[in-house]
């Protein structure tokens, strides 16, 4: 099977998964509304400083305790950093930390949910030795890939980038790093954004799927790409990372 045909087949199966997820989500929402008509869909469950929401529009850009961040002195655990320490960043060279804060994420009904749901980027998922070791960050946190910022949850593929299991942990500690200007730092060899609030100008274009329909359209573009390739940059990034994940699994 050629890589193009394999990509089309994989995306056709993923399209079915997107549709199934949409149906399941609609059914779950309907059951919750019937059980509690006074609970609107916009209400999130507060969890630490970031909160959990019924979408991906919020949440902090945070790293799990123990994440190694590149500084002037080399890699250091994120929890050991403090305001004033200088970290290596893509656009400013080195920049002092303005603030570093933490929050504790708690499971809700035995699961991690919302924009702070942890995502694990496995070793080598983004390139040779990138990241150098497994990297865990919140779902809305963007990775810097091919000049674009892509929220981690948009790249989850079930092989090399996965949602973190809730088994064995009731809580997880996360930390975020704020600079004077939004930038891209080095976390265990992977390029990831620093904290950005809604009023800040992003350091690079941000791309992401705007809901299930948008993701389904993306998958369908990839299905027909062996015949006519109209994939957008995010489609290509996603497809390339998924293909790499399959190769890594085969080589393991």
Image (cartoon, rainbow, N blue to C red):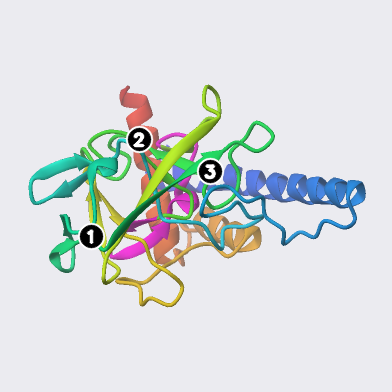
- Residue plotted at (55% across, 24% down): 167
Q: Tally the numbered discs.
A: 3
Q: Where is residue 49 in the image (x, y as percent from the top left)?
A: 51, 53
Q: How far apart are marks 3 and 1 (CA)?
A: 45 Å
Give the label, 1 or 2, closer to the camera. 1
Of the image marks 1 and 2, the number of the one nearer the N terminus: 1
Above or below residue 239? Residue 235 is below
- Quarter of the image that includes the C terminus: top left
Of the image marks 3 and 1, the number of the one nearer the N terminus: 3
Q: Where is residue 161 in the image (x, y as percent from the top left)?
A: 42, 40
Q: What stretch is highlighted in magenta?
A: 142-160
The residue that disc 2 covers is 122
Q: Let me know if residue 151 is in the magenta part.
A: yes
Q: Where is residue 76 in the image (x, y as percent from the top left)?
A: 18, 41
User: Dot 1: within a 10 Å radius of its alpha carbon, few (fewer than 14), some, or many (20 or more) residues?
Assistant: some
Does dot 3 land on a helix, a strand or a loop?
Answer: helix
Q: Residue furthest left?
A: 73
- Quarter of the image that includes the N terminus: top left
Q: Along the line of sight, which residue is nearer the eye, 152 or 200?
A: 200
| Occupied quadrant, residue 68 | top left
Above or below residue 176? Residue 182 is below
| Occupied quadrant, residue 179 | bottom left
Q: Along the line of sight, which residue is nearer the eye, 137 or 60?
A: 60
Above or below residue 174? Residue 234 is below
């Amino acid at each position: 099977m050629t890589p193009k045909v394999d990509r089309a087949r994989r995306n056709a199966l993923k399209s079915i998964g997107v549709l199934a997820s949409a149906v399941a989500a609609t059914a779950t929402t309907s059951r919750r509304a019937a059980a509690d008509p006074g609970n609107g869909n916009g209400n999130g469950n507060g969890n630490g400083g970031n909160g959990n929401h019924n979408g991906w529009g919020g949440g902090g850009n945070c790293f799990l305790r123990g994440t190694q961040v590149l500084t002037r002195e080399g890699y250091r655990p994120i929890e050991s950093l403090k305001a004033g320490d200088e970290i290596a960043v893509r656009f400013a060279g080195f920049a002092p930390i303005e603030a570093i804060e933490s929050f504790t994420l708690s499971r809700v009904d035995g699961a991690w949910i919302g924009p702070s749901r942890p995502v694990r980027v496995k070793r080598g998922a983004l390139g040779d030795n990138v990241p150098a070791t497994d990297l865990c960050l919140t779902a809305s946190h963007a990775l810097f890939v091919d000049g674009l910022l892509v929220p981690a949850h948009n790249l989850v593929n079930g092989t090399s980038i996965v949602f973190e299991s809730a088994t064995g942990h009731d809580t997880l500690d996360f930390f975020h790093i704020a600079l004077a200007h939004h930038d891209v730092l080095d976390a265990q060899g992977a390029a990831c954004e620093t904290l950005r609030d809604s009023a800040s100008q992003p350091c690079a274009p941000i791309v992401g799927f705007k809901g299930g329909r948008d993701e389904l359209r993306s998958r369908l573009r990839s299905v027909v790409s062996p015949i006519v390739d109209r994939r957008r940059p995010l489609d290509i990034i996603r497809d390339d990372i998924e293909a790499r994940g399959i190769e890594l699994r085969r080589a393991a």
